[in-house]
Amino acid sequence: MSSQAATLAVPIPGSAPVAGTAAPARSRGGANRKVLPGFRLTLGYTLAYLGLIVLIPLSALVLKTLGLSWAQFWDAVTSPRVLAAYRLTFGASFLAACFNVVTGLLVAWVLVRYEFPGKKIADALVDLPFALPTAVAGISLTALLAGNGWIGQLLEPLGIQLAFKPAGVVIALIFIGIPFVVRTVQPVLEDAERELEEAALCLGATRWQTFTRVILPSILPALLTGFAMAFARAIGEYGSVIFIAGNVPMVSEITPLIIIGKLEQYDYAGATAVATVMLSISFLLLLVINGLQAWQRRRAGA
């Protein structure tokens, strides 16, 4: 009986709506009315903005590189000096991003879960690398870590030299990348449900089990996002690194400095070739990280 009623309730095309059913709202053109108007206008503005700001400059970079033959391109991007710069740039960026994931999580945890004098000042200091010019950061770190600096003069007698070495590059990239992790994880921790943690503790879980099985899965996508942002920021960093790196070829020379050097020598094709490789590697790494984030979201939803 119920199936017959359901069959009779189905409207026949061209006939009047059945009593008790609502006809879909339609606009003058016959299409379903949108809740918020202006979709075509905003979509056009978005595509135009992305085209002018992102796609056209990157397309010009690739087109300039296509002026090289394959042999010239390969020689430009695989010379020993350029390969050493790749290793330093991506290796230091990866180490700095990994360090920032741990320290950024700790800083965000303290700012969210504890109350202490000067908390607002500490919260504001997290954003200092955003506002501070990168050249100022590089000069400040060099003044601290150089052989005659406050920290460097204490470390050099122990045989530890940070300035003008790859270690100095990692320190500079840690400085400019930590706000990305803190500001990404902090809102997620603020919105986390404390009841789940209390329930885990009541069921006999240790603090470490509560963190690894309750808290960490909920903040892992934010941690991965913060890692991606810090890593991407570190790859393209220039101002804060050139002062503390020393810029010694094959030792402490970063890839952006290689590109600047080629531009100063009017080797525009070589500069764009190295820049294209950097762009491709950065895009692939971000694609992998975004794929991991999507997998984690699906896993958490399941």
Image (cartoon, grey):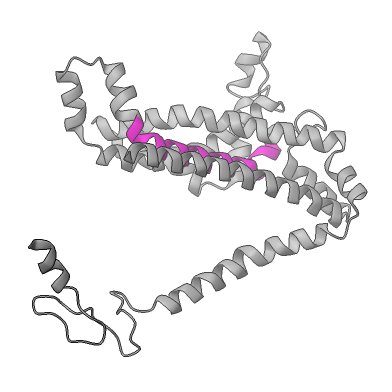
Q: Is residue 155 left or right of residue 5?
A: right
Quadrant into which the N terminus falls: bottom left
x 53%, y 29%: residue: 98
Residue 145 place in picture, x, y as percent? 62, 25
Q: Residue furthest top?
A: 158
Q: Which residues are magenta?
A: 217-243
- In the picture, measured across the screen, residue 219 lies left or right of residue 255, that is left
Please name whichever residue, 130 or 101, is drawn nearer the observer in this view of the structure. 101
Quadrant for the C terminus in the image: top left
Asked if the stretch drawn in magenta spans residue 173, the answer is: no
Q: Which quadrant would residue 155 be assigned to in this image?
A: top right
The mark total stands at 0
Q: Is residue 233 magenta?
A: yes
**Which residue lies at the image location 16% right of the left edge and 31% below the top edge?**
195
Percent x, y of residue 278: 71, 46
- Residue 125 shows in this picture: no
| Front residue of 130 and 182 | 182
Residue 138's place in the image compared with 46, above or below, is above
What secondary structure prevails in the magenta region?
A: helix
The image position of residue 151, as x and y in percent, is 58, 21
Q: Position of residue 64 (x, y in %)?
A: 81, 61
The residue shown at (27%, 83%) is 26
Residue 185: name its quadrant: top left
Q: Decide: is 61 above or below 148.
A: below
Is residue 28 shown to the viewer in this render? yes
